[in-house]
Amino acid sequence: MALSQLRWGRLLALASPVFWSTTGVAVRLLEDADEWQTNFYRSASLALFVLLVLVVRNRCGTWQVVCRAGPTAILAGALVGASMFCNIVALTYTSVANATMLMASGPLVAVLLGRAFLSEPISRTTWIAIVLVGIGIAIMVGGGIRGGSFVGDAIALVGVAFFGSYAVVLRRGADVDMTPAVFYAGAFSATAAAVVACTVGRGLVTTLHDTAICVGLGVFQLGIGSVLFAMASRSVPAAELTLFALGEPVLAPLWAWLVVAEVPATETFVGGALMVLALVMLARSSRGAS
C-alpha cells in the first residue's frame, strides 16, 4: 500500500467524525421542529442521498447490488434506522454529551451480542473495556436521574442496543456490499417518523429553516460522513478506524458548548472519560493483534 494512500485514508477517517459530531448542535439550533419532524426530514434525505450514491457508483448494476444484499440488508437497515430514530429522540430529553457518549458504547454492545449469537470469543482486554463502559454508563445515567434527563439517557441506551444488533447482522452479510442497508435505514426511519407525526404529532409541516437543517443532517452529517468513512476503510486498518471514530463523542459536546453554551454535567465528564478510555484500550488491543 502506498504511503500517500494511507495518509489520504487517515485524512478521510479524521474528517468523518467532524461531520458525525454535528448532530447535537444542529438539533439545538432547530426553532420549531419536534423529534418526529426532525427524524422524517433527516432520514428521508439520507435515503435519497444513499440511493444517489448507489446509482452513481453502480449505474445499471444498482438493482443487482440491492438484490445481493437481500433480507440481511433489510434487517440491518431496520435496526440501524431504529438506532438513528432513538438518537434524535434522546437529544430532545438529555444533553448532547450524554446522548453522544452513550451511543458511542455501541461497538462494545456489539461485542457482547457477537459472543451471544455468533460465538465470537472475547479477550481479557475487551472484558476490562466492557466493565469500564458499564461503570461509565452507570455514572452518567445516575447523573441523569438527578438532573432530570433519565428518560433521554434510557432512550439513548435503547438506541445503543439497536446499533449493537445492527453490527452483528452486518457481520453475517460481510461478503456482500451492505450499502443498501443504509438506504433501508433512512427509508424505515422516515416512514416511522411520518406515521407518528401524522397520527399523534403535529404533522410534517415545519419551517424552511428547520427543514434545511434536517436535510443537512441527512446529507452532510450522516451521508457524507459515512461515505468518507467507508472510503477510508479501504486503506486504514480497522483498529485505527475505531480510534478515529472516537472523534465524534469528543467533538459533539465541544460544538454544543461553543455554539449553544451547553455545559455537560460533572458525571458526564467522569463517565465519558471512562468510556473513551475503554474504547481506546479496545482499539489498541485490536491493532496489536492484527
Image: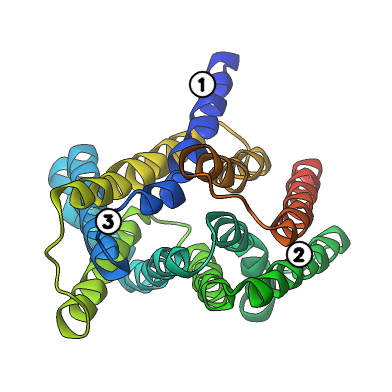
Q: Is residue 1 visible?
A: no
How far apart marks 3 and 1 lie (CA) works out to: 29 Å
How far apart marks 3 and 2 lie (CA) works out to: 30 Å
The amino acid beneath tag 1 is: Trp
Task: Classify mark 1: helix, strand or loop.
Answer: helix
Residue at 85% over, 58% down: 125
Q: Position of residue 242 (x, y in %)?
A: 63, 45
Q: Which residue is mark 3?
A: 42
Task: Classify mark 3: helix, strand or loop.
Answer: helix
Q: What's the image's color scheme? A: rainbow
Q: Which mark is residue 156?
A: none
Whether residue 224 is situated above or below residue 1 in the rendered picture: below
User: Mark 2, mark 1: which one is toward the viewer?
Assistant: 2
Q: Which mark is residue 8?
A: 1
Say which label, 2 or 1, has the lower sequence index.
1
Task: Classify mark 2: helix, strand or loop.
Answer: helix
